[in-house]
Image (cartoon, helix red, strand yellow):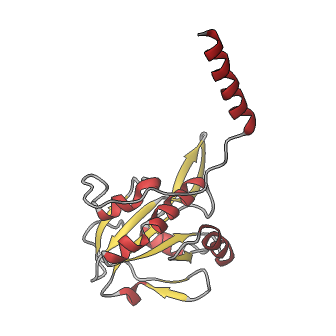
Amino acid sequence: MALSVGSKAPDFTVNDQDGKPVKLSDFTGKKVVLYFYPKDQTPGCTAEACNLRDNYKALQKQGYEVLGVSTDNEKSHQKFIAKEKLPFRLLADVDKTLHTKYGTWVEKSMYGRKYMGTARVTFIINEKGVIDEIIEKVDTKNHTDQILNGNGTSPSQPVKKATAKKPAPKKKALAKKSVAKKMAKKKK
């Protein structure tokens, strides 16, 4: 059964990072951002989580609860939450039950090799448990903008960009640049 906008969102019971069961029906009367992502602590997934973290208050102000879902276990989610200071729950769908209900466990291909994995998809579920929007082309660094502004096509609210830690530039590269600048000045 393929889900579409206007479909009733399938209910579920899945443990969060602390082993506490979470049911979609517990959120009746609230809007839910249910986002599926491939793996904790990978670059794209970290950018997406950090963008949602940095804009969490704006999402809450609009009435949204955020739930992230991957096939990682509770311990992995705890580490991810601690490292990135995530204020929302992550659901441990280790047996892929939730992925199956939402159609996000799919065949993928990388370098010609086929494998099964998580499709990065976000479901926006309204207060009545109906899917209002499905975001299939997730912009990991601007995901909140997509959620608040209808796929990011008409920005009407300021949204913070993701602020995942960037590696410091290597000293050798900086030294080469400054030497090159000095050489250019001498030639003038």
Q: Residue furthest toward the top?
A: 187
Residue located at (63% from left, 61% from top): 41
Nearest to the observer: residue 75 or residue 161: 161
Say which quadrant the N terminus sits in: bottom left
Relative to residue 188, is residue 24 drawn left or right? left
Say which quadrant the C terminus sits in: top right
Q: Position of residue 19 (x, y in %)?
A: 61, 86
Q: Position of residue 159 (x, y in %)?
A: 37, 60
| Residue 142 in which image quadrant | bottom left
| Relative to 103, residue 141 above or below | above
Q: Residue furthest toward the right?
A: 172
Relative to residue 155, is residue 51 drawn left or right? right
Nearest to the observer: residue 92 or residue 97: 92
Task: Answer whether residue 9 is visible to the viewer in this image.
Answer: no
| Relative to 133, residue 22 above or below | below
Q: Position of residue 97 (x, y in %)?
A: 52, 75
Task: Answer whether residue 62 is visible to the viewer in this image.
Answer: yes
Q: How many marks?
A: 0
| Relative to 166, residue 55 above or below | below
Residue located at (40% from left, 83% from top): 11
Q: Position of residue 130 (x, y in %)?
A: 28, 77
Residue located at (30% from left, 75% from top): 62
